[in-house]
Image (cartoon, rainbow, N blue to C red):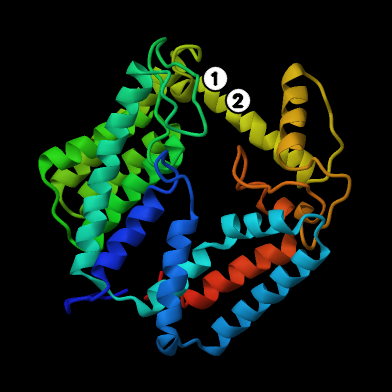
Amino acid sequence: MILKRSFNPYSIFTFLLLTSVVFSETFFMNTSLVYLSLIFFFLLINLSELKFDNFEIISLLLLSIYLTLVIILAKNPISILNNFKYYFSFIFFIIFFKIYPIDKNFIKYLKLILIACVIFVFLDAATINLFPRLELHEEVHTAKFFGFYKRPPGFAGNSSVSSTFILFAHLILIKVYAVKFKKIEQLLIYLSIFLLFSSTGFILMIITFFLLNYEHGKLSSYAMLLLSVVFIFLLFFIIKNTNQVYAQKISLDYFYYVFQEKIFFINNFYLGREFTISSNQDLYFMKKFINVFFNVEETSKIFGDQLYASAPSTSGDSGLLGVIEVIGWFGMICILTIVIAFTKYFKNNF
């Protein structure tokens, strides 16, 4: 999208929209209906400006057919709507940005909200560790790292999602829109990632730091690359010698456990193997995945297990691996078709 310099009359609306999206999982909001309602309202009053090419129309018609069929065939239509909101809400944002210009106000608000998210992480960490009886989130983390520290879920209600947003927003603002951050702001951003204590966040932080500082041909960049490699080896040494009891998210045992969990999932649900229980861990994995995704008597490869489930199938561990199992191959084709149609093969709208 191209950065426009003209004043945008919807700037306040944008601020409210971004705020309601980013903080939708916090204790004082805890709903996605606010930002979805704002987007619907915006699209409704700007219907005349909406224009779709043939490929985009086909992708939307395909999605409409899919949604109609799963609602008609589903055992619990309400759960289908919840699944649709979880897996397909990004479409409303894609359509929104077809007619909404990215101006200076939008970038300014995005930076402001990013800093607010970082501050929230600090307040969240302090509250959870100093006032454990205060329940600020629906999901309560009980694991203690180093024997005393509880990581906060952050504004997104999940430490990995919170850290991912912080790092990607920071990267996009600098690389795409050339936004300047003060040194204290950058320090707070990286410290918030440490407070969130997410292995995903740590990996992304290393990648982000490298992308922000590396310039081809500069000696300092090559020195920074060498230091990054040394840091990765140092990090590997730390996790190899860290007891999972004290720091589960950065221990080698934890990474190995997660790897085994994903392999078990792929073997038994995508490669079609029968359950082979050879350890207590395999038994735990089986119970875990059945309860999360497959607690139904019937399945549908085309429309997913959501047709026969009595409750929505969203989120949870291995949520990404289980997308096809939940929404079916038809749903996955709809997602891919819309992404390709509306991003114009990864050009301006990417």
Indicate left or right for 252 with 350 as reference: right
Q: Identify which residue is drawn at 39% across, 41% down.
A: 28
Indicate left or right for 300 with 49 as reference: right
Q: Identify which residue is drawn at 38% across, 50% down.
A: 22
Q: Are marks 2 and 1 in contact (CB under 8 Å)?
A: yes
Q: Which residue is mark 2?
A: 257
Q: Residue 55's x, y, as percent?
A: 57, 84
Q: Residue 334's x, y, as percent?
A: 64, 69
**Few, some or many C-alpha atoms within 10 Å of disc 2 (few <14, some 14-19, many ≥20)?**
few
| Residue 200 visible at all | yes
Q: Residue 217's x, y, as percent?
A: 18, 54
Q: Identify which residue is drawn at 77% across, 18% down.
A: 279
Q: Residue 86's x, y, as percent?
A: 58, 55
Residue 253, labelled with which disc? Answer: 1
Where does the C terminus fall, quadrant-wise? bottom left
Quadrant of residue 230 in the image? top left
| Residue 229 visible at all | no
Residue 97, labelled with which disc? Answer: none
Mark 2 lies on a secondary structure that is helix
